[in-house]
Every structure is written in structure tokens, then in C-alpha cells.
Image (cartoon, grey):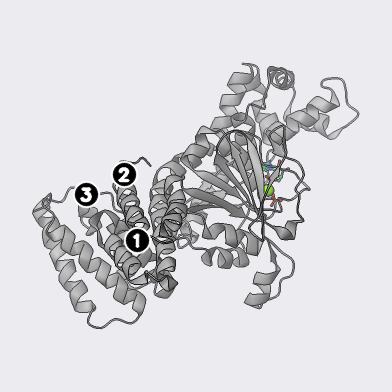
Amino acid sequence: MTATDPIHDVLDDGLRRLASLGGDLPTKANSIGAILWSPPRIVVVGRLKAGKSTLVNALIGAPVAETAALEATNVVTVYQDGSPSRAEVVGMDGRRYPVPVHHGRVSRLPLETPDIRFVDRWLPSAALRRSTLIDTPGLSTLTTANDAATRRATIDGFEQTQGASVDADAAVFLFDAEPRADEIEFLSSLPFTPLNMLGVLSRADAFGEGAMGRRDPIQHASEHADRLAGRLSTLVSGVVPVSGLMAQTSHTGMLTEQHAAALARLAPLSPLEVLRLFDDDTAVSVLPLDMRIQLLELLGEYGVLHGRTVAMGGAAALNAWLADRSGVGRLTARLQSSIARFAILHRAHRILEHMDRLAFNHPSRDQIRSLTTYLRTTPQLNMVAVLEDYQRMLRTDPRASATGELATILTAATAAGQVGLPDDAPRHAIVAEAQRRLATAQQRSLATSSAAEDAALVTLIRTYTQMSTDPRLT
Ligand SMILES: Nc1nc2c(ncn2[C@@H]2O[C@H](COP(=O)(O)OP(=O)(O)OP(=O)(O)O)[C@@H](O)[C@H]2O)c(=O)[nH]1
Ligand SMILES: [Mg+2]
């Protein structure tokens, strides 16, 4: 987002007005302004070992997050663009401790895990200039107790992941199999809507029967992802199949000409012979053991089996094939288009929420409150108000007609779409439909069933009024 963005400009102006109220408000306005000037934050959440840190590395384009088959990520880490490359641990008491970074990775933490709120990690990265990425500890259930409160308390990583999500503007939810009921319940408790939460079916390269199965696992994962997207439509805007491992290898410069040459030497073998070679630690004839280990770590079984012929064309060709098969391009495209759009609205919402909290107990609360009311009703921030009402309605009454209308306004690409008409509807038809919806909303506002619906109807009435009088439409 640039400084010429209308939402950004109005909020910037609002924060200046806040600062002009004096006292401690310039400092408060500055700290809220830090949210406005930083990129939207995307949190990566999901089950233990689903491949979150691997995907974070792929998206950043550098192997900075610790990934391992045994070691678990146990603290929330916030990856943001900045130089020099450095890290700070933020304690539960809010104090910051600089920590050494060796070969791009944070080595030793100065506090015990329970005393750490999160780790701030800066590194220069074009990807992080677009969005900050937050890696979280994996969720895992220790017991299968039925009681919801017990389940919450026993999901490892629950508190930390939820804490990190509060300061995030969008989420990527990773799962490598069917999401469990407790995961779905957890996701529903996060401050997101399907507009800013995207599902990722991870480990696509090992899906189903895996690399040696009868079906191509990536194709199989893709079909399964479509089915899941339908089932999870109240949670996520879609499900993208991704091989984080293949994406990490191809996007972080890990692959060398030696790897490609070694892999190409396996091209004449049958798949079974390749598998035998990788199963037998004593077979040294074709490839040395350490090269076999490296290839498996970089490419996985699927990459090894199916990348052999491509590898004959060299490391660049193999790298391009890995990037393409990984599916990460589709994920990045989604993150940069619709998810980014709603993340920016969500970020504006977080800023207004901070101002609301100030208005709660500040001596200048009356002025702050009229400022936030003014901001919410400016045409430039109307979509933020629509988003806030939509979030409240999703929690209060997801099936109410107001909820659907708010969603339509948010997701439509054109004014016609916002009133449920085809995108090419003529202007007079759009105005007529906006007027009709305005009258219905006014009628409905006489008998509402919740405070959330009251507020939603006020916003709908304002939106349809704006549309009926919009000089570009009339
Ligand atoms: N085959 C395959 N393996 C993967 C993929 N993504 C991750 N892995 C492997 O799975 C293991 C765990 O990956 P991580 O990225 O550390 O997973 P995580 O979700 O961050 O794990 P926790 O932080 O412990 O919850 C590592 O050994 C990865 O190499 C993938 O797309 N395909
Ligand atoms: Mg991890």
C-alpha cells in the first residue's frame, strides 16, 4: 500500500488529529501509526509438523525459520523486512533482548520458552516488504477430552498462536490431512473471516499414497483441495495445494549444479531401483550416502523420482520444475490479490480498534470518540465499517440476510456486483437496486434481533445511500 491509498490517507489524517489533542496522545498516535506504516501481517497457523516453517522460508525466499522432523517451533516468530539482519526476543514483561544471529538463524534464546512472548526477526527481503510473516508453534492435541474448555487448554500452542493472530491481518491455515474438529473450532475463535483466511493443503508431494502411489500425489492433492474448499467455505476463502519442501528448495537457492548432476545420474534407473538405492545405506555404487541424504532432504521422494530427467537439463531447469510443481506461485498470487486486499481493510480495522480502546478510559475520550465515529463514516473508510459489521454478524447470526449483503458488498468487484446485479448492469439499474435495498434495510432496522444487526443495518443504509447518490452512477 502506498501513501496515496485513500484508506491510508484518511487514517493518517485521523492519527494527526488524534495527536493534536495533546497530552500523551502524540505518543499514542505514533505507536498506532506504526501499524499504518508497516506491511499487513500474515500469520501461519496449523497442526504440529504440517510444514509451516518450511513454507515461511519459501515465502521469504531464505532459509531463516528452523524446520525439522523432530524439533518443533516453540515460539512465535515475526519475520519482517529490515536491515541489518537481526533478532530480538520480547519477554512476557515486554522487555526486549537482542539475540545473536548465526548464518541467518537465531541460535540461542536468552529466556525460557514460557517467558517469551515472541521473537522479532528483521531481514532484508522483497517478499517481506509486501507482508510481514508470522510463524507459530504447531497445534497438537494431547488428549481427546470432549469438553471444549479442556480441549482448548490442551491444544499445544493454542495460547501463543491465538495471541499472535490478534495482531495479524490475515492467516494461512496449513493442514496436511483432513482438518480435525478441534482445529476448526480453534480457527473459528480467531479474529478472521473467510475473506482473510486461506487454507493450504501442505505436503502435496506426499499426498495420498505418496510418490510411489498409483496416482500423482500433487494432482490428487489438488482434487482433494477443491473438495475441502467447499467443506471449509465458512472458514477459508479457498484451499491451495502446496509442497512447501519443493518451494523452499527452489526459492531459497539451496539447489546446486552438483545436486542436479547427481540426480541426473539416476535417470536411467527404474523407480523401484531408485527407491532401493535410497533405502539401502550401504549401496555406494551410484551415489555417495551424503548426497542421497541431501537429495532426499531437498527434493523429497517425489522430487527425486520425478525430477531425474529434468535434472539432465541442469540445476536451473530442475529449480524451475520444482518451483512450478510446488504450487507456491498460486499461493503467492492469492496472498497478493484478494487476501492482501482484505488484510489492508483488516489492518485499518485494527487501527480503529486501537483508537476505540483509547476512547474507553482517556480524559479526552469524547473527542476521541467523535474522531473514530467521523473516520468510520467517511466514504473512504466505509468498507472498513462494512468489514467490522460483517465480522460481528458472522459471530452473531451468520445466516441473517444482512450478513450476506455485507459479504456481497465486500467481495464484489463492481458497484453493480455490490447490489447483486451482473457486473455489466446499466447505471440506472444499479441506482434503482441500491434504492430498493435502502428501503428494505430501513424497514428492517425497525425490528432487529441484535446489537450487531442494528449496527450492520446502519452501515448498509449508509452504503446504499452513498450508492444512490453517487455522481458516478446517477
Ligand atoms: N515431503 C514434504 N515434507 C515436508 C514438506 N514441508 C515440510 N516437510 C518436512 O516436514 C518436517 C516438518 O516441517 P516444518 O516446516 O518444521 O513443520 P512445522 O509445521 O513448522 O513444524 P512445527 O513448528 O514443529 O509445528 C520437516 O522435516 C520438513 O522437511 C513438504 O511440502 N513435503
Ligand atoms: Mg515450525
Report crowding for label 1: few under 14, some 14 to 19, many 20 or more residues within 10 A (C-alpha).
few
Mark 2, mark 1: which one is toward the viewer? 1
| Residue 100 in sight | yes
Q: Which residue is mark 3?
A: 423
Dots 2, 1 in contact, CB < 8 A: no
Badge count = 3
Amino acid residing under circle 2: Asp
Amino acid residing under circle 3: Asp
Instruction: Judge left or right: residue 447 versus residue 260.
Output: left
Mark 3, mark 2: which one is toward the viewer? 2
50 or 207: nearer the viewer:
50
Quarter where residue 268 is shown: top right
Residue 366, position as x, y percentages in the image: 33, 71
Q: CA distance from mark 3 to mark 2?
A: 24 Å
Q: Which residue is mark 1?
A: 21
Q: Is residue 133 above or below residue 362?
A: above
Residue for point 64% across, 64% down = 159
Quarter where residue 271 is shown: top right
Q: Is residue 107 above or below residue 194?
A: above
The residue tagged with tag 1: helix, strand or loop? Answer: loop
